[in-house]
Image (cartoon, rainbow, N blue to C red):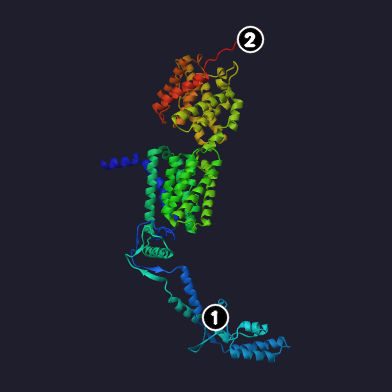
Amino acid sequence: MQPKKSISAIVRHLPIIAKALFMLAPAALIPLMFPSSGQGEHYDYAVGGIWRNNDLVAPYDFPVLKTQTELDQEIHAAKSKSLLYYTRDSSARGQAYKRLEQTMRHRPGLDVRRLRKTMDSIYRIGYVETPSDMPDFESHTLVLLTGNVGSERMPSEFVMALDIADPLLRDTLMQPDIVFDANRTQLELDSRLSLISIATDMMQQGDLIVAKGEYITKEKAQVIHSLEVENDNRFHKHYSPTGRFLGQLVLCIIAFLALYMFLKNTRHPILEDGRKITFVLTLILLMSGATAVVVRTNPALVLAVPLCIVPVMIRVFFDMRVALYVHVTTIVILANMVPNPFEYIFYQLIAGMMSIVTVRNFENRSKFFVVSVVIFFAYSLIYTFGVLSQESTLAGITAERYLVFMVSSILTLLAYPLIYVFEKLFGLTTNLTLMELSSTNTPALRELSRRAPGTFQHAMQVANISEDVISEIGGNALLAKVGGLYHDIGKVEAPLFFTENQNSEFNPHDELDYVDSAHVIIQHVRDGLKLAHKYRLPASVCDFIRTHHGTTVTGYFYAKQKNDHPDEPINIADFRYPGPTPFTRELAVVMLVDSVEAACKSLNNHDKENIDRLVDAVIDDKIKNNQLQNCNITFGDLKKIRKLLKSRMLSIYHARISYPVVKE
């Protein structure tokens, strides 16, 4: 029995397990994006700053390295003192004579005697070869090898190419007989370079390197740098790519599990909607990939990656808490992959928080530029006063860092086109799109007002009242307003079959039986969905079209069929809307407002008692028929909805005084 219970529990929780595994999949991808090599422990310090950490003690023996400038100076000195080795080529003179004889045949007018005499005098002294990559050649000492015996000479003792004025001799006839021996010279240089030590001192284990609060001089900074180099050497000596990947993988899993628990306990609808959670994970992976590319190319530019796109886009699609939590999760994951993680976390966390607050009321595109400016100033202030706090002076500030911040803030503007792309990819809706759809000048609403003016006025009433109700009970008031505007657009296909558009005594339902009339009425939902597809309305708006009647029946024609044909069996499916029932509070509110507003028009007496009774009856009927069971509407919400609907209906249908007529 026990194994069966375990299997049953697994099957019961299979959807939750599947979502958890789906969220953990990026945890394996992100470590693979970044370089597999790492580094030993590094420290946060600056020359001229204050050591703010605890006392730094040498953990083991390590050499104090010379600075690169010191090494360059010693290497230059070694090269300048290095001996240049030469050998004598005894065949050079004979080859020069042969070239002279060949030249005489083509140029009979040459003064051969003079040329021979000049060549003999040069070779008696020695014609030395000058290395092309040695501009300070004349300052070097030459060693002329005769067999295994060498004699030190100076370049000035020989004839060089610059000393030969005749171009025919210099360029054509003669070649050096004192030949440069590159191999022996390199051995000499290597021997001198091997004597150069890379260290100036040796730190013993337990020696104090720098105390807390101590001023960091250049000498102290070089000792700390030497310790970092030794840390790197020891790290790579015992480095395991598999172990590093496993560690990063587990850290990523922990971060994603924390995000999963947050969504499960506070934003469960996001976790339940596959499109939304895929959008969140895709955005995290996109920013992780961009960061990985920069880390592989130039780690110093990691802050140029516009990571604030994550909180900005999450805030536009969801709310501030989700935006902050997703942003923190992204930072925690990436901090383990980038250099200087503490600095990275501080910059990105503050800039992200500022961008979330700035984009709070995101209803126009100018907010993008405001967010970009805020991010730039956040980065710049952190950098400026961070340098001041560490170095007690602004002398260490570089303009390149501000350029990096500017690039990051400008790239954040990519959020604008990305929002459009993600809307289309995942079927999500932002307030920007809803603001555009709330205009009555959209093609769909213009067509509705032209062909079905009564329905258009009804939609306007439903939209305005729904917006007020959602503002009262909580929710997306703009979405409810837009849903109210478009919920009945299907009526444009047969406007005269709906009473609000009939302005004469003719009623087309008089020529149909009750079943056909019900089909015509129900068809406006299907027609509305077709028009929504034609006008490319978002899925969230289409939901209002398909749910505003839920799975209720067309009450008027159902009652007429039942009363006029009491003995005939009735197929209630012929009179029932296809549904589904509302599954959000915005959809539920539009359903209630639509039903109440339409029903109030049928009242003969719009006094307070009748309106109150009607509102209660409509809402109770929806509850009785299980139309509100799938949405998160509470009894407290329904109490507020009843009160607000009664007030609005009474204000719309209040009695008006009759104006007196002026007697002539």
Q: Amino acid at mark 2?
A: Val
Number of the label disc, if any, that sits on residue 139:
1
Q: Say if 528 sits above or below 225 in the image.
A: above
Instruction: Please indicate, yes or no, whether residue 282 appears anywhere in the rendered image.
Output: no
**How far from the left and from the top, in percent, is residue 339?**
44, 57
Residue 7 lies left or right of residue 157; in this view the side is left
Instruction: Please indicate, yes or no, whether residue 458 appears anywhere in the rendered image.
Output: yes
Are the residues flagged by discs 2 and 1 in contact, CB closer than 8 Å? no
> How many other residues sit within 10 Å of disc 1, few (<14), some (14-19) or many (≥20)?
few
**How far from the left and from the top, in percent, is residue 75?**
48, 74
**How far from the left and from the top, in percent, is residue 626?**
41, 26
Residue at the right extreme of this rendering: 109
Number of numbered discs present?
A: 2
Nearer to me, 118 or 56: 56
Query: What is the distance, in whole Å, between disc 2 and disc 1 at their CAs?
Result: 123 Å
Quarter where residue 441 is shown: top right
Which of the two labelled residues, at mark 2 and mark 1, occupies the earlier sequence position?
1
Nearer to me, 411 or 482: 411
Number of the label disc, if any, that sits on residue 599:
none
**Callout 1: helix, strand or loop?**
helix
The residue labelled by disc 2 is 662
Q: Say if 615 sits above or below 296 in the image.
A: above
